[in-house]
Image (cartoon, grey):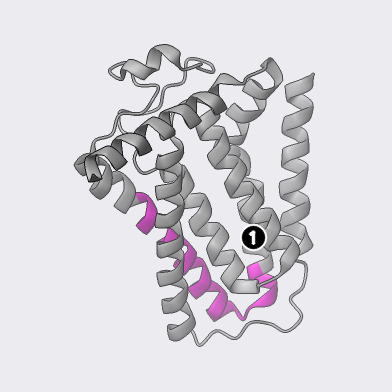
Amino acid sequence: MWTDLLSQLIEADNACLLAINGWHAPWADTFMYAFSGKLIWIPFYASLLYVIGRNLRWQVAVGCAVAIALTIVLADQVGASVIRPEVARLRPSNLDNPLSELVHLVNGYRGGRYGFPSCHAANTFGLAFFIFYLFRQRLLSAFVFGWALVTCYSRAYLGVHYPGDLLAGALLGFVGASLCYWLFYKLCKYKRPERPRHLWVPVAVGGATVVGMLVVAFV
């Protein structure tokens, strides 16, 4: 029974991956490859640190920054160093995976050997959940979760992660963020500001980054 269920889940995962990866266009290749990058989001990360500094006392802000860093490190290392070697699930783009013959590559990018769980998903959803817990503000929360979702989609689009990898990574990010936020809340005695200021800044910076990528993709 369990073997049949696992086999069905794997087949569904393969089909979903090929459906996402199978739709592609030159502009989307450029956009998704850029969106999946890390350095391009540095201004967005800096803007998040800015609003944390503007809304919290400096001691609490430092504790918050440490908690966010711990969230990302915990999610990333548990995924990459603990779970991946044990599960050893090949990426769909890996040449040792028979499915790789059906995968559309962008710029020859294949990623590493194993992909379960996705560290991109763990990191982005870990950050998204932490920011959600921190401010509970609709616009900022919607943006960071949308950013995390598109990041995950870009990883499947590029053929380097199965949707199951991404779902597991998002769950890992949720657990890491929940644990680290709870520690931050308890140790720093955090009280959410009643009227947080400048929360539009990360939305504006992140939105401008997305627009810039789209412009480049279509030019």
Q: Which quadrant is home to the N terminus?
A: top left
- Residue 29: percent from left, percent from top: 62, 21
Residue 213: percent from left, percent from top: 72, 32
Q: Quadrant of the C terminus?
A: top right
**Helix, strand or loop status at disc 1:** helix
Q: Give the quarter of the image for residue 52.
A: bottom right
Closer-to-camera residue (80/165)? 165
At 40% from the left and 21% from the top, the residue drawn is 93
Residue position for label 1: 48
Which range is magenta? 52-76
- Residue 96 within the magenta-colored segment of the rendering: no
Let me know if residue 34 appears in the view. yes
Q: Is residue 115 visible?
A: no
66 shown above or below 91: below
183 left or right of 61 in image: left
Which quarter of the figure has residue 37?
Answer: top right
* Location of residue 205 in the rendering, given as x and y in whole percent from the top left corner: 74, 50
63 is within the stretch colored magenta: yes
